[in-house]
Amino acid sequence: MNETVVLPLWFAVVVLVLATWAAYDKLLMPALRRFVRGRVNVVLEEASSRLRIGVKPFQRTRRQVLIHRLLADPKVLAAAESYAAERKLPLSAVLKTIEHYAREIVPAFNAYVYFRISNWIGRKLSRGLYRVRLGFVDTAALGRVPDNATVVFVMNHRSNMDYILASHIAADQAALSYAVGEWARVWPLSALIRSMGAYFVRRNSKDELYRRVLECYIAMATQAGVPQAVFPEGRLTRDGLMGAPRLGVIDYMLRGFHPGGERDLVFVPLGLNYDRVLEDRTQLLEIDPNARRPNRFWTVWNTLGFIANNLRLMGKSGWRRYGYACVNFGAPVSMRDYCTQRGIDFQKLDAAERKRAIGEFGSHLMAAVGSVVPVLPVPLVATVVLAHEAPGISEFELKVEVNALIERLEAAGAHTYIPRKDLDYAVGVGLRMLTLRHLVEEKDGLYAPRQIELPLLRYYANSIAHFLPA
């Protein structure tokens, strides 16, 4: 005799949910992980055959493993005990804070995201906005860098495009790990940046506990040979001039460096420059004592307006790229050679001597970066036009003075990028960029700066001012 069993609806729903979860956990996720791991391995094999500096095992280590390694570091544990004793806090609470800092700092490098997605976006964005050029490269010196050295690219900081441009230009050299400021700690941007191997830095943090965790992570990555990129200035230039170095990150890199060790630490200077910096007016507002500081709403609104205006110009076929963007590679600075020549071992210096030695090295490094900042058409034309406020200068005289300026710059060691190797064309490009933006006006055949735009013209002229005597 057959009996019908009736199940309550809630029980059927529970069974269905559990079955779905089991299928997701035991079938779908393992299959997805195998698929992703296979794609990542293919990308890594391809990248290893192409990159001059291959992806290091440290970069491929699981993020959780690196976090645990940080938590177990003797320096971090000593700092935690000292911090807990000073503030009379439970050690467990301090360790929980340290774990929070570690999770904030440690990246989650994903080869597929870096080499397939990030590089593609960087290439399209860079070439879409600028005529990107690789200018001077000290090929012979770069070729002498040992294969097992830890390479750190150091560069001047003019725009947030620097991250994208440098990664695009160095795409065949290494998978760069950046030190990124707090501006990028916004979801989902933070997740994307972490997957590209970048680590976050609180630039002005006075928290000794945080600084110990950051120091230990950077020292670990440096000792493991991870290629990195840093901006010694620490922030975007406000007035166009190169700023004084802030050497916290570089100091941390040197904590684990020994002149007689197995791995050399090599700093490669990169110089970047643009015919137009997207954030130029925003940066000038930061140093204008009479200007209201832009809040986040104004910044977002202004950015959206900028994008909308450019889309409108594209629709009317009136949009042009923002001139040239150029990157130069200078001669590498070997820390082993630097220490040997000066008889310095940073590990043996006391606090005062170390601070002085780091300052001297920072000045040496910034001079190396400054020497390879490219000279582009807009800075050239802006420099000359600024010297002729009234009544102005004719186009012929402008070309003559730009040519004389180039000779002075090259005598000072500057690397000038002349598009198409045609001076007339270069001056035309620079002049057109400035007149289209209404920074320079033409009257009766003479070009003169608009008085209201003098700060912006000086901003561009300042990008090459360090090559010229005061």
Image (cartoon, rainbow, N blue to C red):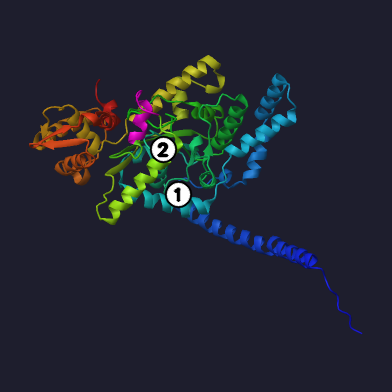
Can residue 103 be seen at all in this image of the molecule? yes
Q: Amino acid at mark 1?
A: Leu
Residue that appears at 59% across and 62% down: 35
Label 1's element?
loop
Give the x, y percent position of residue 318. Answer: 24, 52
Q: Earlier in the sequence, mark 1 or mark 2?
A: 1
Looking at the image, residue 421 sits to the left or right of residue 149; the answer is left
Give the x, y percent position of residue 304. Answer: 39, 45
Looking at the image, residue 183 sits to the left or right of residue 395; the answer is right
The image quadrant that residue 68 belongs to is top right
Give the crowd class for mark 2: few <14, some 14-19, many >=20 residues within 10 Å: few
Label 2's element?
helix
Residue that appears at 56% across and 45% down: 59
What's the distance in space between the residues labelled 1 and 2, CA to CA? Answer: 42 Å
Instruction: Identify the magenta region.
Output: 280-292
Give the crowd class for mark 1: few <14, some 14-19, many >=20 residues within 10 Å: some
Q: Nearer the viewer, residue 286 or 7?
A: 7
* Numbered tag placed on residue 116 in the rendering: none
Query: Which residue carries the number 1 mark?
Result: 51
Give the x, y percent position of residue 440. Answer: 19, 35
Q: Amino acid at mark 2?
A: Trp
